[in-house]
Amino acid sequence: MSQKQNDFTKWYIETIQKADLMDYTPVRGCIAFKPDGYEIWEHIKDAMDKRFKDTGHRNAYFPMLIPESFFQKEKDHIEGFSPELPWVTEAAGEKLEERLALRPTSETMIGQMYANWINSYRDLPVLINQWANVFRWEKKTLPFIRTSEFLWQEGHTAHVDEEDARKETMQMLTIYKEVVEELLAIPVYEGEKTPLERFAGAVDTFSIEAMMKDGKAVQAGTSHYLGTKFAEAFEIKYLSRENKHEYVHTTSWGTSTRLIGSVIMVHGDEQGLVLPPRIAPTQVVLIPVGPWRKHPEIIEKLDEILFALKAKGLRVRLDDSDQSPGYKFNEWELKGVPVRLELGPRDLANQQVLLKARDEEEKISIPLDQIVEKVEHELEVIQTRLFEKAKAFREANAHTHIDTLEQLQQHIARSEENEKIAGWILSGWCGDNACEERVKEQTKFTTRNIPFHPPTKKDTCICCGKEAKHTVWFARAY
Ligand SMILES: [Zn+2]
C-alpha cells in the first residue's frame, strides 16, 4: 500500500468500510460499531478483564454525568480536559442549577465516592475497574482512533502508600503490554511520558506505544501514578495503623477502542483487513468449491468439519450462499478472516482440503483426517507470524542514528522525497520542555515515551546539544 499520508488515511477508511466494522452516524464524530467491529472489542475486553480479575480487581459502574464543581477541585485536571467537554445544561425543560459534563474520564466522580468508602487502612487497597463510554469533543476525528464518544476501561485504585500505588501502576502497564502483544500481535515500547505529555493531574504517566504502517505512533495504553493529588482534592483519607489520618495514593489506567484502529493500521494490507486469530470474530471460513451443488457429500463433509472445529472452541463459519467461490474468497479476505478452507469434489476424492492463510499467498493441502490439529496449528503460526512481521517493520523504521534537529529535518525531507515513511527516531533529550516543544514545532515529531529498555543510550539533547538526561522515542502520532 502507498505510504503517503493521504493515501494511507483513505486506505484505512476503505478497509474499515469494506470489512463492515462500523458506520458513520448523524452525530458528529460518533460512530456505530457494527457486529464484527464490536466483537473485536469483546475479545480484547475479555482478555483484559480476565487479567484484571486474576490480579484482584473488580468491576463497578459510576454515573456518566459529572457536576462541574468536581472538575474545579483538581486544577491540572480541569485545564487538561475542559476544552473537549460536552455539557448537559437542561433537563425536563428546566435549566440545571449546575452544569453536568459527559465524563471524559472518571477520576473526579470516583474520587468523590472513594472519600465515602475509604475510612481505615483495612479498606485498602481499593482495586476497581469500570467498562464505560467516555466523551471528548475532538475537532478532527478518525473512526476507532479518535472519536467524540468511545468505549474504554478505566481502572481506579487507592493504596496506603506510594510504594504500593507505584507497584500497581507498573503491574497494569505490564498487563497492557501482554494483551497488546499476545492478542493483537502488536509490539510495543513501554516507557514513561515526559511532563508535557502526562495525563492531566498525574504525577507520572507511563505508556505503551505502537508503530502503525504509516510510521506514526499510537499510544495504545496508559497507566498513571496520581500521588495524593486527587486524594487531597476529594479528601480521600484513611486512619492508619498508627491512628493517624493519611491521604491515600491513587492510580488510574486505561485502554480504549482505539486498539481496534491500531490492529487495522498495523496488520492490514492491500487486500484489506488482516486480523490476528486470537481476536478475529471469524477465525476460519469454510467454502465449498467446484460443482459442489451436484455433490451433497461436500456440504455434509463441511458440516462435519464445522462441528469438529467448533467443538474445539474455534469461531467458524460455513459460507454456502449462492455467490461464486471467487466472490466469497474476496469478501472473507476483506474481513480479515485468518484461515480459509476450500473443499470441492476433487479434494474430497483425494481426502484433502485446501487451506489458505490470509497473510500468505500459497494454499496448502491438508489431509482430511488431520484437519482439526492442522487448523489449530496454523492459527497459532499466523498469530506468531503477524507479530514477527510487525516487529520487523518496526525495527526497520525505528531510527537510532539521528541525533540533531537538523538531521531529523533532513531525514523527514528525504523520506518525503522518496515517498517513504519517516518512522520513529530515538534521540537524547536534556529534560527541558522548551527543547521538546521546539522539536514539535519544527517537525511535528512529539515525544512518545522514555523507554524502559531503549535499544541504545543517547548522550546529547537532539535540540540544544547539551547533555541528555533521557533517551526518548520521537514520532508523529495519532
Ligand atoms: Zn535540550
Image (cartoon, rainbow, N blue to C red):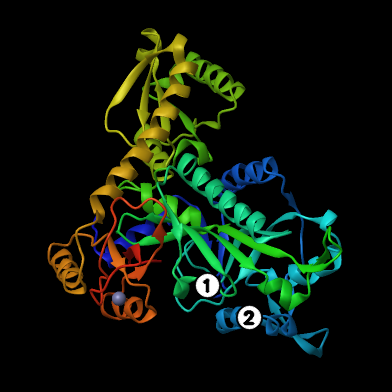
Q: Which residue is mark 1?
A: 29
Nearer to us: label 1 or label 2: 2
Q: State ligand 1's quadrant.
A: bottom left
- Mark on residue 86? 2
The numbered mark at residue 94 is none
Residue 284 in percent (x, y) is at 48, 31
Label 1 residue SS: loop
Does residue 469 show up?
Answer: yes
Let me know if residue 13 appears in the view: no
Q: Position of residue 139 (x, y in %)?
A: 47, 79
Whether label 1 touches label 2, CB < 8 Å: no
Left or right: 256 as drawn, with respect to 286 = right
| Among the 4 quarters of the image, the one containing residue 46 | top right
Residue 141 on image: x %, y % = 46, 71
Decide which of 33, 183 is in the foreground and name it: 183
Quadrant in the picture for the C terminus:
bottom left
What is the residue that sits farthest to the front in this orientation?
242
Mark 1 → mark 2, Cα distance in angstroms: 13 Å
Element assignment for label 2: loop
Density class for disc 2 (Cα within 10 Å; few <14, some 14-19, many ≥20) is some
* Residue 130 versus residue 96 in the image, above or below: above
Residue 381 position in % (x across, y down): 39, 28
Residue 75 left/right relative to 96: left
For label 1, the crowd category at 10 Å Cα-Cα, with few meaning under 14, some 14 to 19 and many 20 or more, is many
Which amino acid, mark 1? Gly
Which callout, 1 or 2, points at the residue further toward the start of the chain? 1
| Residue found 27% across the figure and 28% down from its top | 362
Q: Image quadrant of residue 330? A: top left
Residue type (three-letter) at the residue carrying disc 2: Pro
